[in-house]
Amino acid sequence: MKRAVVLAVAAAIGGLSFATLAQSGRDNLGALKQMRVSGTDLNIPTVPQEGRNAEAIRANLKRVKLPPGFRIDLFAIVPDARHMAVAPSTNMLFVGTRKTTVWAVTDRNGDGVADEVKPFAPSLNFKVPNGVCWTKDGFLIVVEHNRILNFPAAEFFYEGPDVAVIEVVAQGSLIPVDEESYNHGARTCRVADDGKLYVTLGQPHNVQPLMKFSTYDKVGIGGIVRMDPFDGSKREVVALGVRNSVGMDFNPRDKTLWFTDNQTDGLGDENPPGELNRLTRAGQHFGYPYWGGKFKVAGTSAAPELKDMKEPPNAVFPQVEFPAHQAQLGMTFYNAQQFPAKYRGGIFVAAHGSWNRTKPTGALINFVPTNADGTAGRAEVFADGWLDDATGTYRGRPVDVAVMKDGSLLVSDDYAGAIYRISYQP
């Protein structure tokens, strides 16, 4: 019922006329929740899609290596592009950032290239709106550093600066305000078949101090929480022992939740490994900070305070261990038909690239097949070439992957400020 009511209200937004509110640089959430106009300029600037920058990015894409039959093209110029949510009913997507903008990206003529990129809901003041995802009935969820908003029918009401909005979790209520940090604050989200919203909460330290354990476990920092996507009720912690997950997806075959996890810095070039994990039941512990992969972090130079820490019982080890420091972020199951049968039902994972390794590594896309029993097969490199091995220079840093309705694969890149489209033609 509440979904129907909100949709009905949203449908009426175009016919409402109220006194204009001066924006004055403030957050207009209160006005939008009451279906009032904010006074924000109706003419939203768009991002230029052609010119010198676009041509330079296209030239860099010629360096990207793919399996035979695949090609990569520039889909859109999107500044600071992070996680993506492909719209369920239209040929567009919404893209989060680690700054103050959510982008609406539209391919109006369906030619596989975006025609328009502009800010979504610019009358609101977003703060690290990295996480974007959809409910099963078409509501767009935006998870910020410390707030969650829900936008009814966003793909149909994105043309103007003011949009219908539901405040799921108020500012300062996702995590304790004292735990807000510039480090590990990019959230990701997914909605399960049962309608529950899942959110990753990275812990803000290299290794969290012992004094933080109790608070973090209670809140779900360094883990994954779930809740109602409309009012934030029935919140519970479903995964613990996670350092900083910035990507997850549900396997549509068995409904298990898979997620990446970035591990401890400062322990050498080869340790600890990056992780791809599988949650099979609520409450599982994935070992951190005692374990990073199967490398013992507790008691090392990065965590000397934890030398007497006891191993967590029944810790769940990764399905896949990736080379250290590659920073695996966004991931998605591939369940379309365009790519060869080998890729169907498997997982694509974006590796952002290292920042503290002697020789840089990463900036690539991995593919991980899944076995009949639901476990992971052996990972392989699917797309590579954004990192110049000769000079150690990045020409791009993949963040997220998302499957389009035609079966092509989108890749976001916050370094180049772009989204790429990988397609297959035999």
Image (cartoon, rainbow, N blue to C red):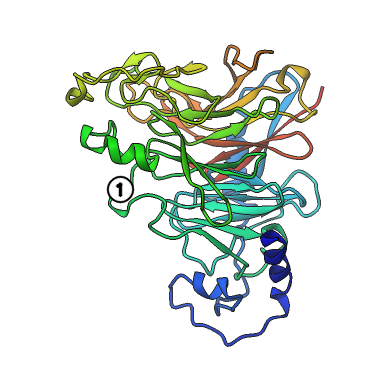
- Whether residue 263 appears in this view of the structure is yes
- The spot of residue 216 in percent (x, y) is 33, 39
Q: In this view, does 282 lie to the left or right of 338?
A: left
On screen, 20 above or below 182? below
Q: How many labels does the image show?
A: 1
- Residue identified by numbered label 1: 179
Instruction: Determine which quarter of the picture holds residue 371.
Output: top right
- Whether residue 386 appears in this view of the structure is no
Q: Nearer the viewer, residue 118 or 35?
A: 35
Residue visible at 46% across and 70% down? 27
Q: Nearer the viewer, residue 392 or 115?
A: 115
Given the image, on which type of amino acid does mark 1 rest?
Answer: Glu
- The spot of residue 158 in percent (x, y) is 66, 63
Residue visible at 66% across and 61% down? 2
Q: Nearer the viewer, residue 387 or 207?
A: 207
Q: Is residue 119 left or right of residue 346?
A: left
Q: How crowded is mark 1: few (under 14 residues within 10 Å), some or many (20 or more)?
A: some
On screen, 273 above or below 214? above
Q: In which quarter of the image is the C terminus?
A: top right
Q: Which of 168 and 87 is in front in this view?
A: 168
Instruction: Determine which quarter of the picture holds residue 230.
Output: bottom right
- The spot of residue 132 in percent (x, y) is 57, 48
On screen, 88 above or below 353? below
